[in-house]
């Protein structure tokens, strides 16, 4: 059974992909197609993780940061839509790079939903937070990201981007109503949440940037972790 | 504690929920969707998840209901115009499509609700441990850390209050800043300890060779039977759907629903698929009841708790 | 058994023996395992045959449930499922882990976690087991159980065990060989009894601090002809010590009366016994009893439906005293301190403090206090939180740094300090709040004997400045030695309290090793010094 599992899962995945493609072409069932596309987006990074030789300390580090990001929802439970998860993921990515950022983001989403409840939003959250980490990691050496203002702006942008990505799965369920009007309506309805997210990102990044990067850098130096 | 469907092999549960999601996304047919919705809700009730269902219902209705409302407002395709709103036609097709999408979303929410109860973390991990061992290991470690960090955070919150760091007092700005100070203490402490975790992994041979997986799940005959039944009863409607049966065409012009022999076969098989777990669950409940009546006439039912994040780990 | 002061190189030595954990650095010399150099050992043998258990029970656990954690090592080594299953079944049976198998690890107690860590290592069937202070974070009951398990492994499986430990009373008598390591140098390597006799000959006080009580008493009392006439007989355990002491008393021509009734019931506190810490022991009770902080009929529970952790508890803390609150695991000792320091509010009853009094609380884990990059910053921020004026803060910080011997490390990162220094830094931070009452949660956990004496000296200093201190502890010896009053917390309330002499001598099991040894002869003697005083009284008669 154990040996069969991998090919079995691959076969099921391929089957689902084909089915989704067919469904999308035939009846415009974009929901299924979008899931398959999401899977395709998440797969390469996780495949790389599987292939890569990871020291035990590095693996623990990734797990700790993911869990910290997930737990960080707790002290702010009293303040609605103020969640430092994105900021923590972006800072981790800033220090440890794109790949680590993506994994921390995706795993944080998956793990926190084990407690808050999985739903159709899980893969989208994994994707959105993963991408937040990935993009921060990619851009961390650019001149404007090195500047404080650039980083804060980036965090602000991701506040909105996150909300927009999370809107997609909702919009996709109405392929025929798709119009700029619908998009505008969906995005207008989530505007205040997104704004709060964006502003709290800026705040958290501004507060955290110094302290947290120095903590993370200290560990990186002290133990030579995750050198790219 | 697990019993009934929850106690079965993870493969059964995963296949079942994957099938349900697939059908919910593919079969845009009111009869099938309502059947699936009712079937899953029945399973939820049998699993004793009625409270969870009620708690989540307002949110689900809001989300799904808004779809039903938004579609006719933004989609104007269709031949049967009901009335005009702000100079825009509202068509019967768009209304129907919106309603069907509402059903789809509701069904998906219900499926996940049941999934959250049935597929516990170790079952989920079991399925992925072979395909992606490192990812599974990483996720499991993160899951292990969460209750530990919660407890640590609780301690830190208590202690740091002495130095005036308190999330429940002061301006929003100060509260957010204080919250992050608490998180930073947690981060530094946890990273320091995590190095010991890393050592303990290494000491037990992590990274020497490809990991095997130990599992507590055994595929027994009931599991195999259920798997087989699910596969067969699931494939029949899927194949028939590919052949064009059981479709409900709305756009560009609504066609009346047809229900012929093909549909009948498809529907029967579909019902079987949807109801297998509820049947298993029901049978077990019935067995317990009758055995208790026989063995301990005065016994009272006991409540079983489940693991959840809201209860503090003290 | 490895022993010696903290920071002397015990951990480094153990890590040299475990190839995967050998620290980075320059080294010379060869470690051989079963005829092979450690570096030449195949990776799988090195991982499986040399097992290691560390200090902190929580930090070693990797997986989320007990069975998963047990399987972790075997999965790493790629054992087939059938092998894993049967080994796991065997081990769960041996350790009685079956009822815990499906529990998430965070529901286990500290002792259970450490047993789980041990079991997880044993599943790889090691031939050599390395343990680095495995019981330092456990309470005495769990620690004893853990050590008994090790003893069984050693006796029944003939497993080689190398353990570094501060808990000498239990471990030393079981050891075949004792290695004393100080400042990275091997000071002695011999059987325990030989070490004791050697320590007696050399009069090395530092070594004597590491002897079990029976052996220390043996060395302290003037040598007698007939007990030394039996070569190789040196008492290590309470049983041996008691037997020897009875012989000793009988042999002394007039003899201490065997009945015990006529023994000196009250021991003069001002004992003129030479010893490094005698002046901080058993200090006078304060003349005027000024209550500073009291709990009145306090009832507390964590959850609405939870059990009552504290139940109608009454306790008063007076000025200038050192109150030791003892009690079993989960008796609510920490909760009591949380209530007294007003971190949590009791559901019923109240905590009354004398006007203008603040209480400082020192948690078990000093890491909870640190959030800045250097020790100095921590202190400065704490001073700001305590609303001290900048120049006053500066003075206060340098004064505290001197008292707590932190001057050298003020610019270091708090996490890079040693455990003892971290504790002192956290204590210094608490002191900035200028508390009149200090509440300490298990302050001696994990400290080596010498550090304990130093810590007690610090407490005595604070008390001499008029501070009163409450300590909750498992450490009977510490309470008996340094407390001015002891109280027992049981079932949510204080069931017994009194001076250490009265408190412990009325207990039968829950008392110091010395008391258990000499109780028939000197029922009120709690420490070696007490016995010595009695002996002097006897000798001068």
Image: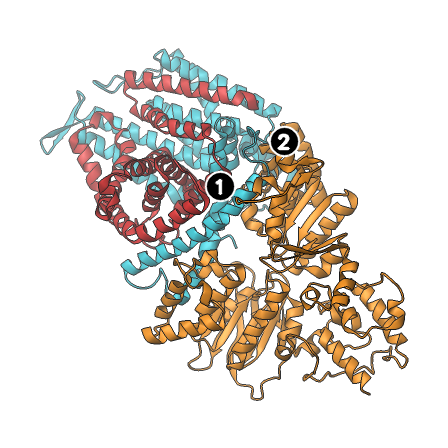
Nearest to the observer: residue C284 or residue A173: C284
Mark 2 Cα-neighbour bin, 10 Å: few <14, some 14–19, many ≥20: few
> Residue C247, position in %: x, y?
88, 71
Q: Colour of chain C?
A: orange
Residue C524 visible in the picture: no
Q: Is residue C72 left or right of residue A80?
A: right
Q: Residue at x 69, y 32 (%)?
A: C86
Q: Is residue C67 left or right of residue C238?
A: left
State the colouring used for the structure image: by chain
Residue picked out by circle 2:
C42
Residue picked out by circle 1:
A57
Q: Quadrant of residue B285?
A: top right
> Residue B152, position in %: x, y?
47, 54
Q: Residue at x 73, y 69 (%)?
A: C203
Disc 1 is placed on an element classified as helix
Q: Quadrant of residue C191?
A: bottom right
């Amino acid at each position: 059974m154990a040996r069969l599992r991998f090919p079995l899962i691959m076969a099921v995945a391929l089957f689902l992909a084909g089915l989704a493609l067919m469904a999308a072409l035939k009846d415009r069932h974009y929901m299924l197609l979008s899931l398959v596309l999401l899977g395709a987006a998440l797969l390469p990074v996780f495949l790389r993780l599987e292939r890569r030789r990871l020291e035990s300390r590095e693996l623990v580090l990734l797990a700790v940061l993911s869990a910290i990001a997930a737990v960080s929802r707790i002290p702010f439970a009293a303040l609605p839509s103020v969640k430092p998860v994105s900021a923590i993921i972006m800072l981790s990515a800033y220090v440890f790079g794109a790949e680590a950022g993506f994994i921390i983001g995706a795993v944080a989403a998956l793990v926190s939903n084990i407690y808050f409840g999985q739903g159709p939003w899980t893969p989208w959250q994994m994707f959105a937070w993963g991408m937040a980490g990935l993009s921060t990691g990619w851009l961390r050496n650019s001149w404007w990201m090195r500047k404080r203002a650039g980083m804060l702006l980036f965090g602000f942008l991701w506040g909105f981007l996150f909300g927009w990505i999370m809107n997609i799965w909702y919009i996709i369920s109405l392929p025929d109503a798709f119009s700029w009007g619908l998009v505008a309506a969906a995005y207008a309805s989530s505007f205040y949440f997104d704004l709060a997210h964006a502003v709290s990102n800026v705040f958290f990044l501004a507060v955290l940037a110094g302290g947290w990067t120095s903590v993370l850098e200290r560990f990186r130096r002290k133990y030579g972790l995750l050198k790219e | 504690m697990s019993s009934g469907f929850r106690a079965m092999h993870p493969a059964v549960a995963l296949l079942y929920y994957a099938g349900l999601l697939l059908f919910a996304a593919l079969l845009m047919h009111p009869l099938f969707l309502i059947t699936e919705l009712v079937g899953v809700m029945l399973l939820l009730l049998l699993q004793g998840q009625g409270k969870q269902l009620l708690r989540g219902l307002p949110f689900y209705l809001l989300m799904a209901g808004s779809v039903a409302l938004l579609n006719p407002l933004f989609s104007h395709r269709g031949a049967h115009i009901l009335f005009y709103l702000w100079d825009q036609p509202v068509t019967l097709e768009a209304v129907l499509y919106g309603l069907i999408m509402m059903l789809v979303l509701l069904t998906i929410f219900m499926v996940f609700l049941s999934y959250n109860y049935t597929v516990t973390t170790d079952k989920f991990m079991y399925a992925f441990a072979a395909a992606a061992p490192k990812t599974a290991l990483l996720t499991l470690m993160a899951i292990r850390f969460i209750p530990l960090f919660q407890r640590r955070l609780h301690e830190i919150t208590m202690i740091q209050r002495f130095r005036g760091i308190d999330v429940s007092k002061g301006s929003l700005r100060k509260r957010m800043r204080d919250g992050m100070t608490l998180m930073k203490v947690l981060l530094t402490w946890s990273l320091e300890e995590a190095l010991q975790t890393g050592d303990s992994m290494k000491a037990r041979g992590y990274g020497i060779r490809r990991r095997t997986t130990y599992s507590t799940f055994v595929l027994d005959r009931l599991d195999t039977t259920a798997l087989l039944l699910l596969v067969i009863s699931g494939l029949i409607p899927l194949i028939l759907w590919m052949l064009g049966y059981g479709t409900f065409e709305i756009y560009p012009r609504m066609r009346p629903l047809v229900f012929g022999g093909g549909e009948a076969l498809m529907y029967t098989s579909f019902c079987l698929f949807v109801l297998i777990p509820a049947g298993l669950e029901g049978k077990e409940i019935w067995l317990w009841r009758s055995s208790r009546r026989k063995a301990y006439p005065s016994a009272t039912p006991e409540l079983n708790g489940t693991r959840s994040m809201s209860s503090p780990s003290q | 058994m490895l022993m010696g002061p903290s920071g002397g190189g015990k951990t480094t030595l153990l890590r040299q023996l475990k190839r995967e954990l050998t620290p980075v650095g320059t080294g010379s010399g060869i470690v051989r395992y079963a005829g092979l150099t450690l570096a030449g050992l195949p990776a799988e043998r090195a991982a499986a045959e040399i097992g290691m258990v560390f200090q902190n029970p929580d930090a070693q656990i990797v997986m989320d449930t007990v069975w998963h954690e047990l399987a972790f090592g075997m999965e790493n080594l790629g054992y087939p499922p059938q092998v894993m299953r049967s080994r796991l079944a065997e081990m769960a049976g041996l350790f009685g882990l079956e009822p815990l198998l499906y529990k998430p690890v965070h529901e286990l107690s500290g002792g259970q976690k450490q047993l789980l860590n041990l079991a997880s290592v044993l599943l790889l069937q090691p031939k050599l087991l390395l343990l680095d202070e495995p019981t330092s974070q456990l309470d005495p009951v769990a620690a004893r159980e853990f050590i008994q398990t090790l003893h069984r492994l050693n006796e029944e499986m003939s497993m080689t065990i190398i353990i570094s430990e501060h808990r000498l009373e239990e471990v030393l008598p079981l050891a075949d060989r004792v290695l004393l390591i100080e400042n990275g140098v091997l000071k002695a390597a011999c059987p325990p009894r030989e070490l004791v006799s050697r320590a007696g000959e050399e009069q090395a006080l530092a070594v004597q601090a590491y002897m079990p009580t029976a052996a220390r008493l043996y060395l302290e009392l003037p040598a007698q002809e007939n007990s030394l006439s039996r070569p190789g007989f040196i008492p290590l355990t309470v049983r041996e010590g008691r037997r020897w002491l009875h012989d000793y008393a009988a042999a002394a021509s007039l003899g201490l009366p065997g009945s015990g009734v006529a023994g000196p019931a009250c021991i003069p506190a001002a004992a003129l016994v030479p010893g490094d810490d005698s002046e901080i022991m058993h200090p006078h009770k304060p003349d005027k009893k000024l209550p500073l902080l009291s709990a009145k009929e306090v009832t507390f529970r964590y959850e609405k439906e939870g059990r009552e952790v504290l139940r109608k508890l009454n306790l008063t803390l007076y000025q200038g005293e050192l109150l030791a609150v003892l009690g079993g695991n989960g008796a609510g000792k920490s909760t009591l301190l949380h209530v007294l320091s007003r971190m949590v509010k009791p559901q019923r009853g109240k905590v009354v403090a004398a006007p203008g009094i603040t209480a400082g609380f020192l948690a078990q884990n000093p890491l909870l206090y640190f959030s800045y990059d250097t020790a100095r910053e921590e202190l400065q921020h704490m001073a700001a939180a305590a609303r001290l004026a900048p120049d006053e803060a500066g003075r206060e910080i340098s004064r505290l740094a001197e008292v707590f011997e932190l001057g050298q490390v003020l610019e270091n990162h708090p996490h890079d300090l040693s455990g003892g220094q971290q504790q002192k830094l956290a204590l210094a931070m608490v002191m900035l709040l200028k508390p009149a009452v200090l509440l300490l949660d298990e302050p001696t956990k994990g400290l080596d004997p010498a550090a304990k004496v130093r810590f007690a000296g610090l407490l005595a200093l604070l008390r001499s400045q008029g501070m009163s201190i409450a300590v909750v502890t498992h450490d009977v010896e510490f309470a008996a030695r340094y407390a001015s009053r002891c109280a027992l917390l049981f079932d949510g309330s204080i069931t017994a309290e009194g001076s250490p002499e009265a408190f412990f001598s009325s207990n039968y099991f829950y008392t110091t090793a010395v008391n258990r040894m000499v109780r028939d002869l000197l029922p009120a003697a709690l420490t070696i010094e007490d016995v010595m005083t009695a002996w002097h009284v006897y000798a001068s008669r």
